[in-house]
Amino acid sequence: MFEIKAALAENARDVDAVLDSLLPLHDDPESRLMEAVRYSTLAGGKRIRPFLVISSAKLFDVSEPSARRVAAAIEMVHCYSLIHDDLPAMDNDDLRRGLPTCHVKFDEATAILAGDALLTRAFEVLADPATHPDPRVRSDLVAELAHAAGPEGMVGGQMLDLLAEHQRLEMAEVTRLQRMKTGALIAISCESGAILGKAADAARQALHAYAHDLGLAFQIADDLLDVEGDEAEVGKKTGKDQGAGKATFVSLLGPERARAQSDMLASQAVEHLEIFSKNAEPLRALAEFVVNRRN
Ligand code: GRG
C-alpha cells in the first residue's frame, strides 16, 4: 500500500530545502521583509500543491530539480494568498498553521509586502532557465500560473468570497467561487507536471479532470473541518464560515451529504487517472488523503 503520510513528509522536506534556498535572508537593512517571508513560508504546511507538481511531473520523467523549483514557486503563491487572506481587511485571522499570522507576528504593512515578495519571487523562479532549458516551457508555466492566480482564478475567487458575506449564494455560485479561489491553483499544480514534461494533450486533460474533482473535494473537506475540526489540530480558527453567515457546501448540503459529495468527487478524481500506470499511485493516494485529513 502507498504510504501517503510518509510520502508527503518526504516531499515537504525536499520542497522546504528548495524554498529555503530560493528565499535567502541577507544581512541588509530590509531584512525584516525576508524574515516575514520565511516565517510564513517555512514553518509548516502540508505542501499539497508541491506534492501534486512533483507527482504529476514524475509521470513524464521530468528532472527532479525542475519539478521542485516549480513546486516551490506554486507554494510561494499559496503562502502569499494565506498571508493576505489573514489580514484584517480580509479574514482577519490571528492563527495560521498553528502560529500567529504574519501581520500579528510582524505588522500589517510588512505582511502585505511579504505576500507581494512571495508572489513576484514565484514568477522570477519560473522565468529562470534553471527551471527548464526550453523558454517556451517557462513562458507556458508563467502564463498558466498567472492565469490561475489572477482575476479569473484565485484573486477573482477571493473577490467573490468577500462579496459572499453580503449575499445568499446558491450551490452553482459557491461551486464557481471555490473552483476559482482554491481549484485554480490546485489545477495548475497538477498540470505543471504535464507542461514540464511536454505531455500529450490526452495526458494533460486527464490531469486537468483529476484536479477539477480533487479541488472541489479538497474544498468540501476544508468546509467540513471548519464545522467539525478541532482548532488545535486544524491549526487555524474554526467555525468561521458560520460566524460570517457564509454559504458553503456544508451549509447548503448539510455535513452528511457534503461528506458523501467529497468522497464521490475523490473517487471520480481517481478514475480520471486510469490512463496512467502505477506511476500515478501518489496522486490516487492523495485524493483519499485530502478528503480524510484532519488539518
Ligand atoms: C488573498 C489573493 C488572496 C487569495 C486568498 C486561497 C485563498 C485565497 C485563501 C485561503 C483561505 C482558505 C482557508 C481557503 C480554503 C482552502 C485553503 C486554501 C486552505 C489552506 O490550504 P492547505 O490546507 O493549507 O493546503 P496548508 O497550511 O497545509 O498549506
Image (tube, rainbow, N blue to C red):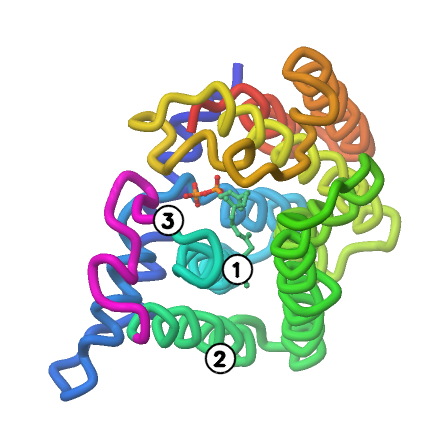
Q: For residue 238, what is the image quadrant?
A: top left
Image position of 27 (left or right of 1) = left
Q: Could you tell me if the residues under marks 3 and 2 are in contact, i.e. CB atoms within 8 Å?
A: no
**Residue tagged by mark 3?**
93
Locate the C terminus and report the quarter of the image it occupies. top left
Q: Which residues are magenta?
A: 93-109
- Identified at 53% across, 57% down, the residue is 67
Q: Which is nearer the N-term, disc 1 or disc 2?
A: 1
**Residue tagged by mark 2?**
124
Image location (x, y in percent) of residue 206 = 81, 42
- Identified at 51% across, 23% down, the residue is 227
**Nearer to us: label 3 or label 1:** 3
**Nearer to us: label 3 or label 2:** 3
Density class for disc 1 (Cα within 10 Å; few <14, some 14-19, many ≥20) is many
Q: Could you tell me if the residues under marks 1 and 2 are in contact, i.e. CB atoms within 8 Å?
A: no
Q: Is residue 59 above or below residue 188?
A: above
**Type of residue at label 2?**
Glu
**Type of residue at label 3?**
Asp
Density class for disc 3 (Cα within 10 Å; few <14, some 14-19, many ≥20) is many
Image location (x, y in percent) of residue 217 = 67, 30
User: Disc 1 versus disc 2: distance between alpha carbons?
Assistant: 12 Å
**Residue tagged by mark 1?**
74
Q: Residue pushed farthest top? A: 256
